[in-house]
Image (tube, grey):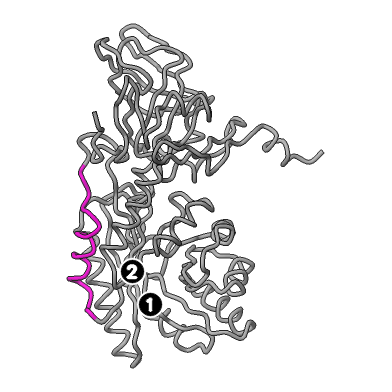
Amino acid sequence: MTLVMENGWPRTAAWTGGELRIGGIGVRELAAEFGTPAYVLDEEEFQGRCAEWREALPDGEVHYGGKAFLCPEVVRWLEAAGLCLDVCTGGELAVALAGGMDPARVVFHGNNKSVAELRRAVTWGVGCVVVDSFTEIERLAALADEAGIRQRMMIRVTPGVEAHTHEFIATGGDDSKFGFSLGAGLAAEAVRRVLATTSLELTGLHSHIGSQITDLGGFTLAARRMADFLLACELEHGVTIPKLDLGGGLGIVYRPGDPVPPRPAEVVAALREAVPAQVRLAVEPGRSIAGPTAVALYEVGTVKEIPGVNTYVSVDGGMSDNPRPAMYGAAYTALLASRSSDAPPREVTVVGKHCESGDVLVRDLPLPADVRPGDLLAIPASGAYQRSMASNYNHVTRPPVVAVRDGVARAIVRRETEEDLLRLYLR
């Protein structure tokens, strides 16, 4: 039985021989070799999703949002797929460099880039810096002048479009820490200040309205506002602004019954209707590429039944490797992955091992009533914002990322050790 991709599982995920297999490898074998918890990443799925976006926008730019998940091996996959890379910190810049990314294909985001980070971007030859404040315009202009170059850059604009998503991941409204407000006239002033410099080259305008979006209404409204603003700026200043970057944020399916988001080709078609043909279009998919490619694999440690109240199934990870449910109520599903069971289902709460009552991974989950210690549970749609947001809370080490393809498994991010943690402490 092949699991359905629309339910959040990678395309190679299948139920065979009484266990879940991904990339042709059973979870029992993966757990025995790499331990648990672990993120199991379907390499074929990741590269296929990159190709789908690239094919949807052959005459534009696809910038992978590195904050979703990034490591040097992923950077090499992006290079091979012909994608650009968005980074938002000096650390992500360092990973891009370690993976051999062409700096001309790197776009540097962030609402508070330090002088050191901006200097590193200018020195390395980053292809585009997205400025986010008047202070940053001044900083970048001075650094570019000091380096004797004309730095290519875009201006981030908040178009006043509210994405229908959680308030913590909505970024397009006027009350946002990101960008220059269109409605308040700040974006227009930013354009004037950039054009008044001699060391900055305005190559485009940028907007991003939020994340985990499954309806195109907000995207197209933002695209129309941004296109109108771009044309107004060209008319006012007598210049050509060649590119419009409309960000990312396309959602994914986490559980059966979740809205199925549009495909990349549908997204691009909708944006193209709102953007003049002569303007180069750029998009920034992150979650929609990485999210469905990985499965989080855990081992059950205890099963605690409170008659008439709840049954808690505790696993060997938790909020340190997936903080999203605790942070903003992200909802997941899971299945018993290591064996078949004829036991009737009962609703349980899957919890982690951390010293927090809020350390919950999945609520109201039907699992076989005979679930027991030693069983393996698999949570799909775990490829985005889990490893990248993972922490060492309670001094728990972070899990590895294991890439699987055609029956071969290899760690592309190794498991942390206690020695890694202790190395940071000064004696």
Residue 5 pos. (x, y %): 26, 40
Task: Using the image, determine if residue 386 lies above or below residue 201.
Answer: above
- Dot placed on the residue nearer the N-terminal end, 2 or 1: 1
Asked if marks 2 and 1 touch (Cβ < 8 Å), the reply is yes
How dense is the environment of label 2, judged by Cα within 10 Å: few (below 14), some, or many (20 and up)? Answer: many
Is 404 positioned to the left or the right of 98 in the image?
left
Question: Label for residue 282?
Answer: 2
Question: Is-magenta flag for residue 272?
Answer: yes
Task: Using the image, determine if residue 249 lies above or below residue 302.
Answer: below
Question: Is-magenta flag for residue 219?
Answer: no
How dense is the environment of label 1, judged by Cα within 10 Å: few (below 14), some, or many (20 and up)? Answer: many
Q: Which residues are magenta?
A: 259-277
**Residue in the picture at 34% in, 9% down:** 370
**Residue in the picture at 36% in, 30% down:** 21
Secondary element type, mark 1: strand
In this rendered view, identify the residue nearer to me: 224 or 27.
Answer: 27
**Residue in the picture at 43% in, 79% down:** 190
Residue 113 pos. (x, y %): 55, 65
**Label 1: which residue?**
204
